[in-house]
Image: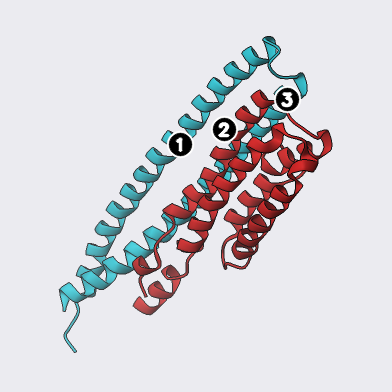
Amino acid sequence: MANLDFQNLVETLKTEVTNLALSTVNNYKNEATADALNMLNMMKENLSTWTMELADGKMSTKDFEFLVLGQKELIEMNALKQAGLAMIQVDEFKNSILNLIIKTVIGLI
Amino acid sequence: MLFVIFSAVSCASISSFDQQAYTQTTSVKVDALNLMDLAKYDYATQENNVKEYLTKQQKIYEYEKNRPKNEITLKLWDKLLDKDGHLLGGFLNRWQTETKLNETFIAEEKKLVDKAFDQISGLESKKIKPSEISQ
């Protein structure tokens, strides 16, 4: 079996894993922010439309309240989705580390 | 040492992508939105359509329930289908109770339910494909 320079291996992995972690966090942060902003814009537009429709007598107060509560539940669903996306990022990160270790070790042999 | 690292990182936190779940979710979404349009009519005249839809919905829910590490997706379905809530489950419940619903309300509620389904399919589509998982 070929001799492995473990010190070199650890140092290489340390740098690569740090870069990988930073890019994973940045990608997730950007996607999550965009998604949350989209949801916020949708809520703003909806509330404006519903208020006008309520004032014009196109819907009842009960309809209006139902929609507002529905919007709240949709935001809760979005938060759950974000939690799921974060878990996917963790799995992708772990997956990338595995590939990185395999690639680096093979490269040193 | 490497074995320990491999063991620590190879355990998934969430289910991987499932094409069948994704296809069924998007298919049921179309059926649900079409069914909601019928809420302008008397519930009693549409009961067969509702039952037919609920059977499809039940099938996808059972499928999702039996997938390992699928808790988040199941919680999303529970929110969407909650009869006491204000998304699809609550809408169908209200239709049954009040016999028929206002068309403006139906149109606005459909937008919310549309987005609610997108949360489920959006999460599924981002899951790691089984072929991309390191063995």
Judging by the rendered image, the residue that carries numbered circle 2 is B111
SS of the residue at dot 1? Answer: helix
Does mark 2 fall on the same chain as mark 1?
Answer: no
Amino acid type indicated by mark 1? Asp
Host chain of mark 3: A
**Amino acid on which the number 2 mark rests in the picture:** Lys
Q: In which quarter of the image is residue A18?
A: bottom left
> In the displayed structure, would residue A36 be above or below residue B35?
above
Distance of label 1 from label 2 (alpha carbons): 17 Å
Q: In which quarter of the image is the N terminus of chain B?
A: bottom left
In the rendering, at what x and y percent does residue A57 appear? 71, 12
Q: What residue type is labelled 3?
A: Asp
Reading the image, the residue beneath label 1 is A35
Q: Which residue lies furthest to the front in this view?
A: B45
Q: Residues within 10 Å of mark 2 (few under 14, many from 20)?
A: some
Q: Which chain is red?
A: B
Picture coordinates of residue B113, whole percent (x, y):
60, 38
| SS at mark 2 in the image | helix
Upstream in sequence: badge 1 or badge 3: 1
Query: Pointer 2 and pointer 3: residues touching (CB < 8 Å)?
Result: no
Whether labels 1 and 3 share one chain: yes
Q: Quadrant of residue B101?
A: top right
How far separated are the C-alphas under marks 1 and 3? 27 Å
Please give the label number shown on residue A63. 3
Q: Residue at x 62, y 12 (%)?
A: A52
Colour applied to chain A:
cyan
Residue A75 in percent (x, y) is at 59, 36
Callout 1 crowding tier (Cα within 10 Å): few <14, some 14–19, many ≥20: some
Which residue is painted at 67% across and 33% down in the image? A70
Q: In this view, does B102 lie to the left or right of A98?
A: right
**Residue B87 can be seen in this image:** yes
Nearest the eye: B42 or B96: B42
